[in-house]
Amino acid sequence: MEHMRRVAYETVLRACGFGSLAIFCIMIGMSFLPRLAFQAGGFLTTMMALILIYKAYEARTKPYRHTEMWLYLEPGDRPPAAYAQWASATVLRETYLTFALWTSMIAIALWVIALVFGLAGK
C-alpha cells in the first residue's frame, strides 16, 4: 500500500506541476499589472483546488484499472483484484485531498497578495 501511495503522490504531483507551470506563465504574462496577475493566479489556483476536490470525489467510483497510478505500478506491486478497487480509491482520494489542501493554501496566499496590491493602488 505504501508503494501505491508513492506512485499516486508522484502522478498527482506531476499533474499539479504542469498546472502550476501554466498558471505561472499566465501570471508572468500579466506581470505589468501585478494586482491582475495575482488575481488571475489566485483564481486559477482556486480552480485547480476545486478540480482536485472533484477528482477526489470521482476516485471513489473510478475503475482502478483506468487510473494513471495503476499503469505505473509494477504487476508484482499491484494488490489482488478483490482489494484493488478499495485500495486504489482510498490512496487516490487521500492524495488528491492532500494536494487540494496545499493548493488552496497557495490560492489564499495569492488572493491576499492581490488584495495588498489592490489596497496599495497598483
Image (cartoon, rainbow, N blue to C red):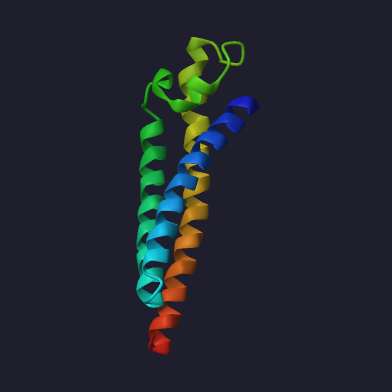
Find residue 70 and report its horizontal and vertical position in percent. 49, 21
Tell me where residue 110 sits by quadrant.
bottom left
**In the displayed structure, does residue 81 sit left or right of residue 5?**
left
Q: Nearer the viewer, residue 31 or 114?
A: 31
Tell me where residue 32 sits by quadrant.
bottom left
**Res. 42 in view:** no
Find residue 119 and report its horizontal and vertical position in percent. 40, 87
In percent of the image, x 49 and y 46: which residue is there?
17
Asked if residue 78 is positioned above or below residue 39 in the image, the reply reads: above
The quadrant of the rendering that contains the N terminus is top right
In percent of the image, x 35 and y 54: which residue is there?
47
In percent of the image, x 41 and y 56: which residue is there?
23
**Res. 17 in view:** yes
**In the displayed structure, does residue 36 sit left or right of residue 97?**
left
In percent of the image, x 36 and y 34: which residue is there?
58
Asked if residue 78 is positioned above or below residue 94 in the image, the reply reads: above
Find residue 6 and report its horizontal and vertical position in percent. 61, 32
Asked if residue 23 is positioned above or below residue 14 in the image, the reply reads: below
**In the displayed structure, does residue 108 sit left or right of residue 62?**
right
State the residue lying farthest toward the right. 2
